[in-house]
């Protein structure tokens, strides 16, 4: 790369970073960031920074987060809390991880074609809807996997197979299902006749998945088992699902297209890429993540508004360009190479101006979220009313604003014996969490526990408290609220 080329790539990455950072910080200021997931990961990483186990009150009383998902890699962010003790440090870290993916994508495409196409590809990746969706989700561990898979493809292209194997080991630390992704990586290595690295990666993937799902997660889970088998359309167990896939593949394929949201997800991923990824072996790397979503029982994971698609974006973009460069090499028409990332950029530009449901940057680009609403100001008054070092339950959007100075959970998740403050939002249907309370249920519970209003119906926000003298808890139990944010 020449100095000019490096500066151009840096300019694209800087522009994307600033735009995403602005969107993320505006979300936080406007009380759009939530306990699920920013509050959860803040509490976990904050505890790692204190050299404590990742106990997360947002998930429940004494809930160990490694009993939910296997993502020890998030502990690497703990030192950031020694610099800035604020949940927004996770927003910044995630944006840097995402934007760094432009480097391996640029290098792969530049080796295939030229600087112009590579620069356009990097810009297309950073502007595309999967990256917008994950930034709009505030934080998720899958962000670590996004640059990792891109560097793995770079390693495969450069025949740096040892690097691919090493990065595969790191990918296992991102999430338990990355073990299945490694088996797909092994298939790609096998297609390239890299037999030994393929075998090593496959064994590592299978062993890593087993270790996470059968050993670590059950050990820390309150239920004593992995709690995310949500593929009953395939069968009640993993074994039954395998039998179904092998004996009824036609029915399995039908499940992948049996809802408009699923069809929409296919179209959003592949139509802007001219359907080309299907002809590249690299599409196999993204298959486990995509198919696990489409086979999932939960309707919400089929929608293109969550964090899950970010790791697929560099895979499918490079897969499309891999096929296109072969087409151009055989049939000519070199102008097609830059035309593909330009197509993605045009789709992203139109979507970012007209379709905020899929391209959430629209609100930042048009200035829709630049001003603070009266409701956000009311939420700020509510969190300001809560003192430090107490056990408090709040609505989902208030969690990120209290994680740095209280032991905060969602309504209904905290030990009632030590709970002294509540924030209830009566303008929402549910107050957040895996088993959420309705506002009516939260008010009934507050009355039963003897809470009295401090702020009443401020834009639908209520703040309630009760005196510690009214509690049956011991002094040591009450001190646990303050000790949660201290190294013990």
Image (cartoon, rainbow, N blue to C red):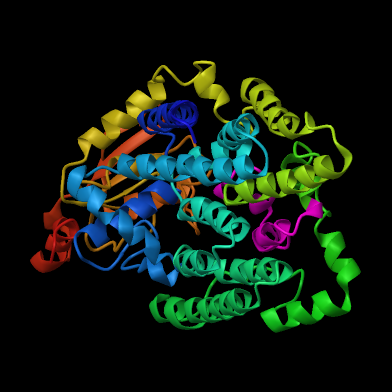
Q: Does residue 297 lie above or below 353 as drawn?
A: below
Q: Which residues are magenta?
A: 278-307
Which residue is more in the foreground, 405 or 455? Answer: 405
Q: Position of residue 258 (x, y in %)?
A: 83, 54
Q: Position of residue 375 (x, y in %)?
A: 40, 25
Q: Position of residue 431 (x, y in %)?
A: 46, 47
Query: At 64% from the left edge and 53% from the top edge, which residue is drawn?
Result: 301
Q: Is residue 34 left or right of residue 78?
A: right
> Which quadrant of the view contains residue 339?
top right
Query: At 50% from the left edge and 37% from the top edge, which residue is drawn?
Result: 136
Residue 354 inside the magenta-drawn segment? no
Q: Position of residue 174 (x, y in %)?
A: 46, 62
- In the rendered image, the residue lying farthest to the front is 2
- In the rendered image, the residue lying farthest to the left is 475
Q: Does residue 485 lie above or below 51 as drawn?
A: above
* Main secondary-structure element of the magenta-colored stretch: helix
């Amino acid at each position: 790369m020449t100095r000019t080329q490096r500066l151009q790539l840096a300019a694209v990455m800087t522009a994307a970073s600033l735009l995403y950072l602005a969107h993320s910080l505006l979300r936080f200021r406007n009380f759009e960031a939530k306990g699920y997931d920013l509050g959860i990961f803040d509490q976990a990483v904050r505890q790692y920074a204190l050299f404590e186990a990742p106990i997360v009150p947002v998930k429940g009383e004494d809930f160990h987060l490694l009993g939910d998902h296997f993502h020890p890699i998030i502990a690497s962010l703990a030192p950031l809390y020694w610099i800035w003790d604020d949940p927004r440090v996770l927003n910044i870290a995630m944006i840097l991880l995402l934007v760094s993916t432009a480097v391996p994508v640029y290098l792969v495409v530049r080796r295939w074609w030229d600087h112009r196409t590579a620069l356009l590809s990097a810009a297309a990746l950073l502007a595309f809807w999967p990256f917008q969706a994950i930034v709009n989700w505030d934080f998720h561990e899958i962000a670590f996997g996004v640059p990792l898979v891109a560097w793995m493809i770079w390693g495969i292209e450069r025949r740096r197979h040892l690097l691919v194997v090493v990065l595969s080991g790191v990918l296992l630390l991102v999430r338990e299902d990355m073990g299945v992704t490694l088996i797909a990586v092994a298939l790609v290595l096998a297609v390239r006749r890299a037999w030994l690295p393929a075998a090593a990666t496959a064994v590592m993937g299978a062993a890593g998945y087993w270790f996470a799902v059968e050993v670590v997660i059950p050990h820390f889970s309150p239920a004593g088992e992995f709690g995310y088998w949500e593929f009953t359309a395939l069968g009640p167990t993993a074994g039954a699902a395998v039998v179904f896939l092998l004996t009824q593949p036609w029915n399995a394929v039908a499940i992948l297209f049996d809802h408009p949201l699923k069809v929409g997800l296919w179209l959003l991923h592949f139509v802007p890429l001219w359907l080309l990824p299907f002809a590249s072996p690299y599409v196999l790397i993204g298959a486990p993540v995509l198919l696990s979503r489409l086979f999932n029982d939960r309707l919400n994971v089929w929608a293109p508004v969550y964090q899950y698609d970010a790791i697929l974006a560099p895979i499918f973009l490079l897969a499309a360009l891999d096929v296109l460069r072969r087409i151009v090499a055989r049939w000519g028409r070199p102008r097609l190479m830059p035309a593909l990332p330009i197509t993605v950029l045009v789709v992203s530009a139109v979507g970012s101006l007209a379709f905020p449901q899929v391209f959430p940057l629209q609100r930042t680009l048009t200035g829709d979220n630049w001003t603070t609403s009266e409701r956000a100001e009311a939420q700020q008054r509510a969190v300001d009313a809560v003192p430090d070092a107490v056990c408090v339950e709040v609505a989902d959007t208030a969690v990120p604003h209290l994680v740095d100075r209280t032991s905060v959970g969602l309504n209904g998740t905290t030990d009632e014996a030590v709970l002294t403050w509540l924030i209830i939002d009566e303008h929402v249907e549910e107050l957040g969490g895996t088993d959420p309370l309705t506002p009516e249920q939260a008010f009934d519970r507050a009355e039963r526990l003897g809470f009295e209003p401090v702020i009443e119906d401020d834009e639908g926000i209520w703040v309630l408290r009760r005196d510690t003298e009214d509690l049956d808890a011991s002094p040591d139990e009450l001190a646990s609220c303050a000790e949660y944010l201290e190294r013990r």
